[in-house]
Image (cartoon, rainbow, N blue to C red):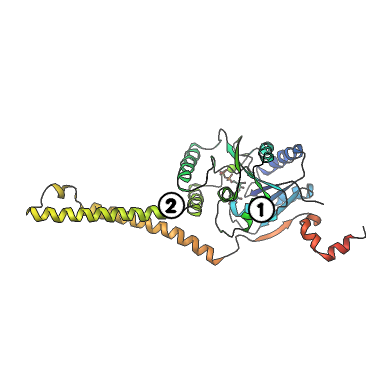
């Protein structure tokens, strides 16, 4: 058994409603590509019947299906990293389990890779999400473009294809909280983008309420840029300079006018100024806290996730590993 040409990595969290449709559409779409493939599902601690459905699918298609079961919910991106650490394909495609990324579009990504690109991102045409999500992601895309070196038209689209080298680099990055599409971009030598269709969720609802979206974007911004911190110190310098100038003006003014009860005192309001500065200071503290928190996470070096079990066929070990094992080779030789 050789390594497949394509690995499809799919994080799954409470998707019992979507999984049957996913199975029904994904496998025919992959068969139609005419390459060897494997599908790796990472069950991210689902509390519904997702794990049972994945096991059934594995029993139905053990040759092309592998299932990694987390013992708890660690998040979409750690789930993808686990898939990356276990996949064997030459090319790796990530997609969501809810069919918002049509599996029939995978061929487009691979066609772009055939032209020599090592990283192909999808750009969702006609997004089927709420207006709030579309507005928020447009704003975040714009902010990211300005303060990081990462150039992506649609950072939120998870239908993406990666070369083996990029996936290996991501798996080797020991970052605790990260944003896979952006991390991949930093390793890519020749990235490209293609337009892909987007559909409404097959079933269930989004797992990203506003709070989680904000967290995710913090990961993205602080994970790939120090600009927020630098902006803050620059603002500090600006305020200090302005304060100094204002102070000089006030002193000079008072030297010449004995009654300071007019012009300057009109806009010189200590309370408002103090409120403003305290607000900025708290904001800055929070910002520094965000980076310090990430350092804290990182130095503890906890495992990013724990795997309860991996469902795969007995011969599914990577080929290289098997070759190194003399006992296994001995067992195999009489055949
Ligand atoms: N997901 C996951 N762990 C989580 C949240 C989501 O593995 O904690 C998976 C989910 O099952 C889906 C994908 O990540 O396959 C994207 O999630 P969702 O569709 O809820 O996000 P949205 O499309 O709203 O951005
Ligand atoms: Mg979705």
Residue 69 versus residue 161 in the image, above or below: below
- Residue 17 shown left or right of residue 27 in the figure: left
Categorize mark 2 by other alpha carbons within 10 Å: few (<14), some (14-19), many (20+): some
Residue reaching furthest to the top: 126
The residue positioned 80% from the left and 60% from the top of the image is 322
Image quadrant in which the C terminus is located: bottom right
In the rendered structure, find residue 84 and report the number of the disc placed on it.
1
**Residue 238 image position (x, y, % from top left):** 30, 53
Relative to 121, 231 lies left or right: left
Q: Which mark is residue 293?
A: none
Kindly state the secondary structure of the residue where label 1 is placed: helix
| Residue occupying the point 25% across, 52% down | 242
- Nearer the observer: mark 2 or 1; the answer is 2
Closest to the observer, 156 or 145: 145
Identify which residue, 212 or 56, lies in the foreground. Answer: 212
Mark 2 or mark 1: whose residue is earlier in sequence: 1
Label 1 Cα neighbours within 10 Å, binned few <14 / some 14-19 / many ≥20: many
Count all numbered tags in the image, as a single digit.
Answer: 2
Where in the figure is residue 58, as x and y percent of width and height? 76, 50
Residue at x 32%, y 55% (from the top left corner): 237
Cα distance in 3D space between marks 2 and 1: 30 Å
According to the image, label 2 marks what residue? 227
Q: Nearer the viewer, residue 210 or 26?
A: 26
Q: Could one spot residue 45 in this view of the protein? A: no
Expressed as whole percent of the image width and height from the top left, the position of residue 265 reads 15, 50
Residue that lies at the very extreme toward the right in this rendered image: 334
Q: Disc 1, ligand 1: is the CB inside 8 Å? A: no
> Which picture quadrant has residue 250?
bottom left
For label 2, the SS is helix
Q: Is residue 222 above or below residue 130?
A: below
Q: Is residue 231 visible?
A: yes
Tell me where residue 192 appears, x and y as whole percent: 60, 40
């Amino acid at each position: 058994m050789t390594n497949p040409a394509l690995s499809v990595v799919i994080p799954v969290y409470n998707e019992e409603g979507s999984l049957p449709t996913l199975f029904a559409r994904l496998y025919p779409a992959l068969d139609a590509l005419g390459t060897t493939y494997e599908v790796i599902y990472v069950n991210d601690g689902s509390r519904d019947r997702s794990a049972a459905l994945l096991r059934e699918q594995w029993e139905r298609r053990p040759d092309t299906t592998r299932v990694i079961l987390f013992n708890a919910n660690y998040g979409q991106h750690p789930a993808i990293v686990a898939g990356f650490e276990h996949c064997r394909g030459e090319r790796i495609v990530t997609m969501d389990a809810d069919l918002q990324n049509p599996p029939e579009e995978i061929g487009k990504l691979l066609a772009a890779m055939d032209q020599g690109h090592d990283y192909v991102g999808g750009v969702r045409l006609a997004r089927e999400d709420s207006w709030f999500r579309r507005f928020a992601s447009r704003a975040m895309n714009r902010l990211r473009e300005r303060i990081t070196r990462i150039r992506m038209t649609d950072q939120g689209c998870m239908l993406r294809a990666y070369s083996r080298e990029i996936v290996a680099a991501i798996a080797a990055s020991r970052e605790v909280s990260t944003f896979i599409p952006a991390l991949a971009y930093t390793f890519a030598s020749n990235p490209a983008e293609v337009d892909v269709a987007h559909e409404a969720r097959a079933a269930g609802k989004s797992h990203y309420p506003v709070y989680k979206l904000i967290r995710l974007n913090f990961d993205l911004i602080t994970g790939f840029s120090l600009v927020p911190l630098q902006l803050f110190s620059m603002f500090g310098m600006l305020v200090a300079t302005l304060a100094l100038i204002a102070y000089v003006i006030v002193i000079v003014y008072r030297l010449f006018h004995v009654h300071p009860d007019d012009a300057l005192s009109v806009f010189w309001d200590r309370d408002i100024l103090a409120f403003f500065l305290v607000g900025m200071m708290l904001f800055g503290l929070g910002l520094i806290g965000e980076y310090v928190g990430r350092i804290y996470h990182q130095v503890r070096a906890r495992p990013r996730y724990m795997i309860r079990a991996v469902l795969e066929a007995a011969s599914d070990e990577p080929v290289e590993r098997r070759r190194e094992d003399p006992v296994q080779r001995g067992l195999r030789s009489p055949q």
